[in-house]
Image (cartoon, helix red, strand yellow):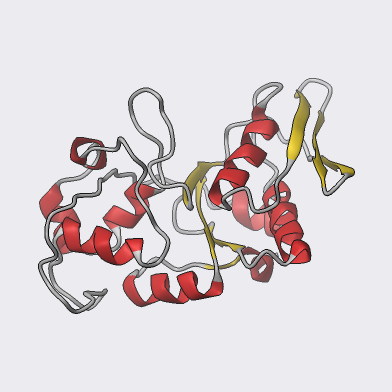
Amino acid sequence: MFRSLLLVQIALTGCAAMMVSHAPAEESKPMGLFDRSVSLEVQLRELNKCGVVVNDGVTESDLLSFDSKKDMENAPYTGLVEALGFELEREPYSAIVNSLWMCDYERIEDHGAYKEIVERLELMSGAALGLTDITDYVDLEEASAWVAFSFQGERIRWDAEVDNDWLDPYIIVKYDQLLKKANVGKRIYSNHTDYGQVAFFAVFTPEQFECFQRLSKINLALIESQV
């Protein structure tokens, strides 16, 4: 049911991108979703308190790749947050923010695809699980795909359902289940209905999630609650 819900939501996707500035804070009070206009600097400062930290080397130009500064400031904590989930539009094409991810489901083409997924999840969680020796196998013609890794001395393999080049979202659900089992204090939150074939994922502690919810209009929920 979860997979069907995810993959039938295909439509147009909105994108954007943004950056951190060390300019002095404009306000001493938190500014949230009920403010009419909030500067990018203040938005980034408040998101930083929620564990949403822009990576080194990201510039304001990177963040303004898909939307204007004015639009992002007039709709605070929406366009900016969505933009922060994407990768840079230039080399090294790395994550703008580690803890957020706008994930296009149509991404499984060959060997390495699921390895890349698990590595991205490890990046999001700050390597909370400490997975090592990540390998995978993907052959669409054979309808065969899996990813394997070592975790706490155990070799684990997850088989993936093959549906052309679509990601099997249960791989991400299984990663969240492992976070829960390991009791590392972080979980995966998601919105897989509002962005067409792209899903919005975030990894937060409960405190960070509550902080994020106070700021952002983006609907997120524990991924396990949507299975």
Q: Residue at 74% across / 33% down in the picture?
A: 134
Q: Is residue 134 visible?
A: yes
Q: Is residue 199 left or right of residue 130?
A: left
Residue 95: image quadrant is: top left
- Of residues 217 and 28, the one nearer the viewer is 28
In the depicted view, which residue is nearer to us: 182 or 113? Answer: 182
Quadrant housing residue 115? top right
Q: Residue at x 35, y 70 (%)?
A: 217
Query: How many numbered badges does the structure rendering display?
Result: 0
Q: Give me the residue at 29% from left, 43% from top.
A: 17
- Residue 188: percent from the left, percent from the top? 60, 60
Q: In the rendering, at what x and y percent does residue 121 appear?
A: 61, 46
> Eyeballing the image, is 100 above or below 138?
below
Left or right: 44 as drawn, with respect to 164: left
Q: Quadrant of the N terminus?
A: bottom right
Confirm whether residue 1 shows in the render. Answer: no
Q: Residue at x 77, y 29 (%)?
A: 136
Residue 97 position within the rendered picture, expressed as x and y whole percent measured from the top left: 41, 47
* 90 versus 194 height, above or below: above
Answer with left or right where residue 42 lies relative to residue 119.
Answer: left
Task: Work out which residue is located at the far right of the displayed protein and give it.
Answer: 154
Name the quadrant containing residue 74. Answer: bottom left
Where 53 sits versus 182, above or below? above
Identify the image quadrant of the C terminus: bottom right
